[in-house]
Amino acid sequence: MKLDFAREISVKILYDISENNSYSNLILDDYLNKNREKLTSQDISFISELVYGTVSWKLTIDNIIKKYSSIPLRKISKWILNILRMGVYQIIFLDKVPKSAAVNESVNLARKYGPKSSGFVNAILRKVEIKDYEEMQDLSNKYSVPEWIIEELQKDYSSEEVERICKSFNLKPKITIRINLLKISKEDFIEKLKDNNIEFEETEFEDFLHLKIKNISHLDLYKNGYFTVQDISAGLTAKILNPKSKQMVLDACSAPGGKTTHLAEIMNNQGKIYAWDLYEHRLNLVTQNAKRLGILIIQTEVKDACKKYEELDKSFDKILLDVPCLGIGVIKRKPDIKWQRKKEDIEAIVKIQRQILENCSNYLKIGGDLVYSTCSIFKAENEEVVRDFINKNSNWSIVQEETILPDENQDGFFICKLKRKS
């Protein structure tokens, strides 16, 4: 019996995710890098599809398994459960994979990772049909979204918007990049893309493109600092803050540095940006990004944005607060969020968000601008935090407010620009 190598790698990744709470994107990259010499580009695409698809559709898949399993899910070996999940995903959602291949390869994996369970796997997967999914009508099963997320969304949005948001969680995210205009013009960058046979799509913003390529980090264009991977929604935070050359700017929640380096590019690499984070190893990512992009104006500092530093009062012309959040707007990129977050997390994260906004607002000069942003779309983390702040601080006003719902082109985001009047 020869195991399909791509499927075996995939089930190992799924096991790691379920047993060790590993983030799917990180553990996937780790496995791919370790096995790159043994994998074709088709293998890499297939493994990515199996991992992200199975993780994203886990709730729906588990309910289909329950329909045919005489054993409760909690009592099934984690290896066998993940083999079943991956098998169901192929049968229900991958048109190009014949059912016979999905079943047979899953049985082969079961013979290695749970020899006594191969018959069990065979019996369940042979019963699974596309109608098992088509008969599901409720939003939770239809889009594999936990009930509590749907309930929170229903508080804030219309039923049509909620369904559209839930549907977006399972879309394949586009790879969007920001051209580093400090190093290269858009015209010259596009010529380099064509020279490298890399397909792209234009966006509404001059410095952002969608690239039709899977692996970015190996490209010389990336290594030489001609671009950064960044979603359009995330890029809007720096555009809306709009810092000027030679200004003093604070990015209080900086790592890994995508928005920090964007601020520097907008400032034409002139002025000073103080980049804070709680941990040195995360700030090292900011430093590495800045070096690759040729940016010289970022100074990293290990600082806690939840603490008050009175010596910094009225020190900065502009402040960016891209605060910690539940990340509901980026689920299509990080499907683990659906399973790792809980309803009770909302209260805890909102407390942190309010504390950061209240403390860091003191560091802005009179007449300066502050952008509060999250990659979440719960109003409790967004509008309600800002309204609470404005109600307590009459010397502040809202200049601009944007709620971006996730779709096929961009992530969900909230961005609010505030001005300190006196």
Image: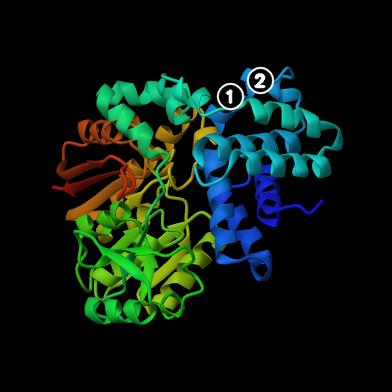
Q: Name the foreground residue: 353 vs 74.
A: 74
Residue contact at pointers 1 and 2, CB within 8 angstroms: yes
Q: Name the foreground residue: 175 vs 42.
A: 42
Q: Name the foreground residue: 269 vs 89.
A: 89
Question: On the rendered structure, is 151 left or right of 383?
Answer: right
Q: Amino acid at mark 1?
A: Ile
| SS class, disc 2 | helix
Q: Quadrant of residue 221?
A: bottom left
Spatial CA span between label 1 and label 2: 7 Å
Where 276 sits versus 143, above or below? Answer: below
Q: Name the foreground residue: 118 vs 373.
A: 118
- Classed neighbour count for the residue bearing mark 2: other residues with Cα under 10 Å, few (<14), some (14–19), many (≥20): few
| SS class, disc 1 | helix
Residue for badge 1: 64
Question: On the rendered structure, is 241 left or right of 115?
Answer: left
Question: Residue 68: which disc?
Answer: 2
Q: Position of residue 257 (x, y in %)?
A: 42, 62
